[in-house]
Amino acid sequence: MVEIVSKRKDNEKHHRIIEAATKVFAKNGFYQSKIAQIAKEAGVADGTIYIYFENKDDILISLFEEQMKAVLDNMSLQITKIDDPAEKLEIFASTHLGLIEKNKDMAEIIQVELRQSGKFMKEYKNERFLEYLDIIGDIISEGQKRGLFRKDVIPGVAKRAFFGALDEVSRFWVLSSRKQYDIRTVAKQISGFFLNGIKE
C-alpha cells in the first residue's frame, strides 16, 4: 500500500514538472528557459527535477511523448466513430487543428520550441509521431481498397503531404498575431483540396 501511494506521488510530481515546463517553455522559449524556473513553477527544489529528468531536452521530449499519447488516443477515438474514409480525413484535419486552438502553450512548444532541440531533431526516435502519420496512411489505404481513392496514390507520400499542410497551417496559427481564418474553415479547405486530388 505504501509503495502504491509513493508511486502515485511520484507520478503527480512528474506531471507537475511537465505542466510547469509547458508554461515556462511557452513563455520564455526553450533555450532561454532554466531548470530553476521550471522547478519554481512546479513548486519543487531544483535537484528534484534531476530525479525525473536528465536535462532540459529530456523534459521537452517527455512533454512531447505525453502530449502525443493523448493526441493519438483522442484521434483514434474520433476516427473509429466514422465509416467513410473521406469523412475520416476531414475529421482528422478538424481534430488536429482544433487541438492547436485549444492548447496554445503546447502548440507553441511543438510547433516552435521542439524543433530547436538538437537532441530531439537528431537523436530522438519519434515513434508516436510515426503512429500518428500511419493513421492518415491507413485511412488512404482503406479508401483505395473500397475504390474511393485513386490506386496510383502512394499512402506513404500522401500521408506526409496531408500532414505537412496541416502542420504549416498550425505553425502559421501559432506564430501569427492576427488570426485571419477560422480553424474549422481551414480544416475543411485543406481536407477538400486533398480529397479532390485523391478521389476516383
Image (cartoon, rainbow, N blue to C red):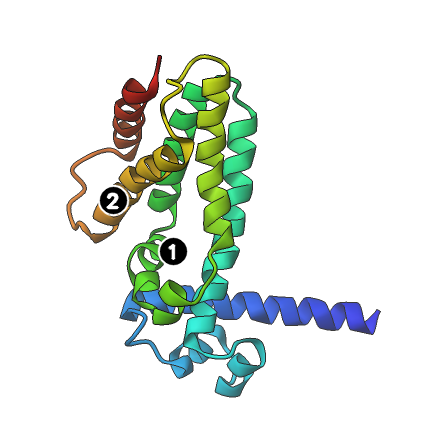
Is disc 1 surrounded by few (<14), some (14 to 19) or many (20+) residues within 10 Å? Answer: many
* Residue 23 visible in the shown view: no
Disc 2 marks which residue?
168
Cα separation between marks 2 and 1: 16 Å
**Disc 2 versus disc 1: nearer the observer:** 2
Q: Is residue 166 above or below residue 103?
A: above
Q: Secondary structure at mark 2?
A: helix
Q: Position of residue 79 (x, y in %)?
A: 51, 29
Q: Residue at x 50, y 71 (%)?
A: 17
The front one of 175 and 164 is 164
Q: Which amino acid type is marked by label 2? A: Glu
At x 52%, y 40%, the residue is 74
Whether 51 is drawn above or below 136: the answer is: below
Q: Position of residue 158 (x, y in %)?
A: 35, 33
Q: Which numbered disc covers residue 106?
A: 1
Q: Nearer the viewer, residue 46 or 198?
A: 198
Q: Amino acid at mark 1?
A: Met
Q: Check the picture and name the quadrant holding the C terminus.
A: top left
Find residue 102 and report its image quarter.
Answer: top left
Report the residue that reaches farthest toward the right: 1
The x and y percentages for residue 118 are 34, 70
- The secondary element bearing badge 1 is classed as helix
Residue 10 position in % (x across, y down): 65, 72
